[in-house]
Image: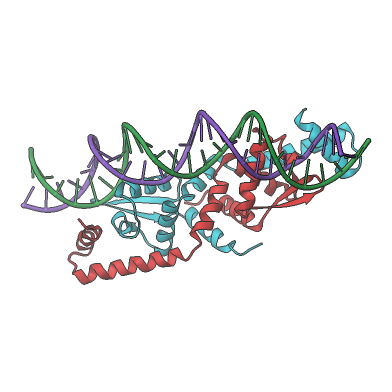
Chain colours: A red, B cyan, C green, D purple
DNA sequence: GGCTAACTTTAGCAATTACTAAATTGTTGT
DNA sequence: ACAACAATTTAGTAATTGCTAAAGTTAGCC
């Protein structure tokens, strides 16, 4: 059974009758929609979302966002559980994804959120109670 | 070595001298920042982000968003690789996370994006080239 | 009622992820 | 040069995830 058989039956059902041409046309429409959707940067977007989709990393970004200033790695430690190593891993993944920037200051490292991170948090906050 | 020892050395370093009271004060500030950050709905936000943080699911949401209308499960099949089961799993996870709504129409099921999903895609699109 | 079709759900497994511990890098102070 | 320390990186492992295949559910049709 080809994948378009089911589509054909659906269109038949939905419109009460349809020709092969109707099926091809709808398929072309769907492919166009897919192509338009595909223009977005799937790979980097998924990387960004994956970076934020973890409690430790989400909390780090939230803390930095709430702080509104750059923070030193040593300032996260008292707030997060986990080892220094875990925190460092988290910070690296977030930085790689473009959600944080890292700045060297002597032996200390300071992080701050990027505009992209801020935009996502604002979108999350703003859409929380929408239906 | 307590976790605040490093913070103390940092403040010492950063400000050129600090008392125990300074350390306590900064720690209190950080805890306040953390508390403010914690007001956000960590659990549901991470669920939403996890749902979107997967190529199959991201593509589904993108397609639905680009379509601007509800689509039947049978209309995704020609556009996505994977089995029907995989698509169904993806749709369920997205629906559970509040990114899609499901509607029964006879033997067909139709999905559309929620305002929350749309808000997140718009934020991703709008923040792509910001530094 | 029984058949088929359109999903969905359950079960199970391979691949990925998130962490810890240990080794390493880079910086400062002596 | 060396010791101490901040942070990162590497290596290894337990937990989670993303899929497939098979069984289950619901709706229409004869």
On the question of residue A5 being in view, the answer is: yes
Q: Nearer the viewer, residue C17 or B98?
A: C17
**Residue B52: x %, y % from top left:** 48, 50
- Is D25 displayed left or right of A52 in the figure? left
On the question of residue B119 being in view, the answer is: no
Q: Quadrant of the N terminus of chain A?
A: bottom left
**Residue B79: x %, y % from top left:** 34, 60
Residue displayed at 45% across by 50% down: B99
Q: Nearer the viewer, residue A131 or A61?
A: A61
Q: Nearer the viewer, residue A18 or C4?
A: C4
**Residue B8: x %, y % from top left:** 83, 35
- Is A13 displayed left or right of B115 in the figure? left
Residue displayed at 54% across by 45% down: A53
Q: Nearer the viewer, residue A35 or A123?
A: A35
Residue A119 location, quadrant: bottom right
Residue displayed at 59% across by 61% down: B127
- Is B101 displayed left or right of B5 in the figure? left
Residue B61 vs B13, above or below: the answer is below
């Amino acid at each position: 059974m080809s994948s378009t058989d089911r589509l054909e039956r659906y269109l038949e059902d939905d419109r009460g009758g349809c020709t092969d041409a109707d099926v091809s046309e709808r398929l072309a429409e769907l492919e166009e929609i897919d192509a338009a959707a595909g223009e977005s940067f799937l790979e980097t977007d998924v990387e960004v979302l994956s970076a934020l989709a973890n409690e430790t990393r989400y909390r780090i970004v939230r803390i930095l966002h709430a702080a509104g200033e750059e923070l030193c790695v040593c300032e996260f430690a008292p707030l997060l559980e986990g080892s220094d190593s875990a925190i460092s891993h988290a910070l690296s993944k977030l930085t790689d994804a473009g959600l944080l920037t890292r700045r060297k200051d002597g032996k200390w490292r300071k992080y701050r959120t990027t505009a992209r991170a801020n935009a996502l948090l604002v979108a999350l906050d703003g859409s929380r109670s929408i239906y």
